[in-house]
Image (spheres, helix red, strand yellow):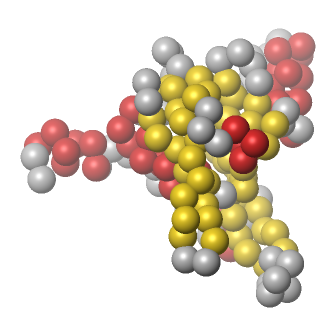
Amino acid sequence: MTTETKAIATTDNALATFAVTDANVGAMYCSVRPTGDRKHDAQIFAALNNPDERLANHINEVLKIVNVSVSVMQILDDETGETDTVPRTVFIAEDGKTYQATSKGIFNALQKAYMIFGEAPWKPALEIKVKQVAVGKGSMLTFDVVG
């Protein structure tokens, strides 16, 4: 490992160390901070509470992301009947549009992006290309950074 790689690998920031565990259900990380301006803060709340789009609907598209939010939640697996602890990631794009995914692959890629590109907000926006890759018997969402 080079010195530069070591520095990147040991970067300590809030999302890089955020854990998706049963003990953290309900925990939330958000790169957007309230400003005290009620109108602006209400827009942030709306974006995080009710995102515009599902990220899965944008496979192979490039999105310009400036902010992110991750919350830990539990969902019921319809096939097994068991609950699974998962990250719910919301991307806030440069144009204000919001995209959400309940995906460990997206969360893992986001943690790596934080280690390499630093914490959001990103200026200029981090350009990502959403992908769906085969894993085991199914598939998983992830992304590549393209700009």
Q: Quarter-wise, where is residue 136 in the image?
A: bottom right
Q: What is the residue that sits farthest to the left in this orientation?
A: 2
Pick whichever, 26 or 77, lies toward us: 77
Q: Is residue 34 left or right of residue 129?
A: right
Residue 93, placed above or below residue 16: above
Pick whichever, 57 or 88, lies toward us: 57
Residue 27, placed above or below residue 80: above
Q: Quarter-wise, where is residue 77 in the image?
A: bottom right
Residue at horizontal 44 percent and vertical 30 percent from the top: 146
Residue 92 image position (x, y, % from top left): 69, 28
Residue at horizontal 35 percent and vertical 38 percent from the top: 116
Can residue 88 be seen here? The reply is yes
Residue 2 image position (x, y, % from top left): 10, 46
Residue 11 image position (x, y, % from top left): 33, 44
Q: Is residue 62 left or right of residue 6?
A: right
Residue 111, placed above or below residue 97: below
Residue 60 image position (x, y, % from top left): 59, 38
Pick whichever, 77 or 73, lies toward us: 77
Can residue 31 be seen here? The reply is no
Pick whichever, 9 or 101, lies toward us: 101
Q: Quarter-wise, where is residue 135 in the image?
A: bottom right
How many marks on residues? 0
